[in-house]
Amino acid sequence: MIEFPDLGGGALAPLVPFLILTVGGLVLVLIDALIRGGSFPWHIVSTALPVAAIITYAVRWPSGVGSTPFGPMFLEDTFGAAVGVLVCIAAIFGLLMSGPFLEKAGRTRGEYYSLIIFSAAGMILFTSTTELLSLFLGLELLSIPLYILSGYLRKDTKSLEAGMKYFLLGAFSSAVFLFGGAFIYVATGTTDLAVALSRGADSAMVQAGFLILFSGFLFKAATVPFHMWAPDVYHGAPTAVTAFMTTAVKAAAFGAMGRIVMTAFPLGAELPLTRILWWIAVLTMTVGNLAALTQTNIKRMLAYSSIAHAGYLMIGLTVYADSGDTQALAGMLYYLLAYTLMNIGAFAVVINWAQQGKEHLEIPDYAGLGWRTPGLGLAMSVFMISLAGIPPTAGFFGKYYLFVSAVDHGFNSLVVIAVLNSALSVYYYLRVMVALYMRKPMHELVLGRSMLVGAVVLVCALGTFWVGFAPDSFLPGVPSIVSWFQGSVLALR
């Protein structure tokens, strides 16, 4: 007999952020159908949805861990809320940048905004469950809109190539995920991952299934060796979409992996999970940085940089898998916040330096722009310095928290490799600043700047400093932010 959950008495309250985005996305589709191409402030209206989701998270945050009628299919805790807030922040910036970007490209459509909203909703579901079918639904809901968005510029062959490659890559990762999940279900008879891993920890089929399943997560995080087409996708996709993908998808992937690693502790004695994650972290940061050294296209450089940063984030996951120390996972969340601000800010500058129907993506094109547009040049310098991990920016302190947790648990060699990789990355980040201030322009560029995108740049630049070293004063500073992340991880279940 099928038992239906009791949905009365506010039982749906934990789902409110998810429902705000899903229902809001459907309303946007309906509005687009009704106005039939008429003018509408899509980027402003759609931005209200993730803002409302963040407000809901803030209201329910004090509840800590709440029971839901959905069991493992949807878990309410402050860890899921912290990752959800990161996803919503990336969505807000991505939506605000999209309006001016699409106007320049001549492709303003309502469905574009609903796809970003649906993808964000999928990310929230993906990071708030330990049930195999719900994980797969979240994975598909976050992925399918991004396949469409990657190929959104239909007259751009690079965008079409990005859409096709991301679709093939995503289809393969989904198949891998399902294959691993099938192994676990056949061996244990349950789709509750926590129960399955504790029940069949000594089963070879469960162990193989978990490794295959976990590989599906690594595809979304774009770690080595599952990164091959990620730079092509990031390069060809619309720049506003790339900014959203490189930040929100990474937050969702690492948030979900953090929760899954927690459920996999019964396998710790059976699988060398820590050693596997150690090697993935080393290879990811090294391959990403070495490939970025040779790039002259700013989007491809930031794409390979994104892979390298996934390697740094894997340090927190490695330490957590080995020791269960929540400080490592809190450091990972802090780094995700810093990365979101500095990476979206860099892409916002790229969008603001574009002209009608054409983007300037080659680094030599930026010669002299630091003097011609001093505000944007300074902001881009801040983002490059922060991405390189130079103090006093958020990028430095993000790496500091990760490295300290690794050293505390004996991962000294991993930290040494990470520091060497960070030093290597300084070259290609500072190369952008050299072009901005130390090269003469070969030709005069026509720039089509936007006040709205400029506001995104300003907020991200200020946030990069604020998250780096601001004290608690009239606004929450670094102590409060770190405390929030630490408290959220303590509620992980």
Image (tube, rainbow, N blue to C red):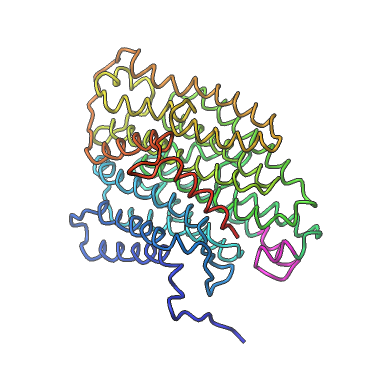
Locate residue 457 relative to residue 428 in the image: left or right: left
Above-or-below relation of 243 to 448: below
The residue lying toward the viewer, choosing from 66 and 339, is 66
Locate residue 271 relative to residue 228 in the image: left or right: right
The residue lying toward the viewer, choosing from 403 and 476, is 476
Task: Identify the residue at image location x=28%, y=53%.
Answer: 109
Q: Of all residues shown, which one is farthest toward the front? A: 473
Q: Magenta stretch: dominant SS?
A: helix
The picture places residue 247, in percent across and down from the top left corner, at: 45, 43
Q: Of all residues shown, which one is farthest toward the left? A: 39
The residue lying toward the viewer, choosing from 427 and 318, is 318
Image quarter where the N terminus lies is bottom right
Give yes or no for residue 167 being in the magenta stretch.
Answer: no
Task: Identify the residue at image location x=25%, y=24%.
Answer: 373
- The quarter holding residue 439 reads top left
Locate residue 418 relative to residue 81 in the image: left or right: right
The picture places residue 213, in percent across and down from the top left corner, at: 66, 55
Task: Identify the residue at image location x=59%, y=67%.
Answer: 72
Question: Which segment did they paint magenta?
Answer: 179-198
Image quarter where the C terminus lies is bottom right
Task: Identify the residue at image location x=22%, y=26%.
Answer: 446
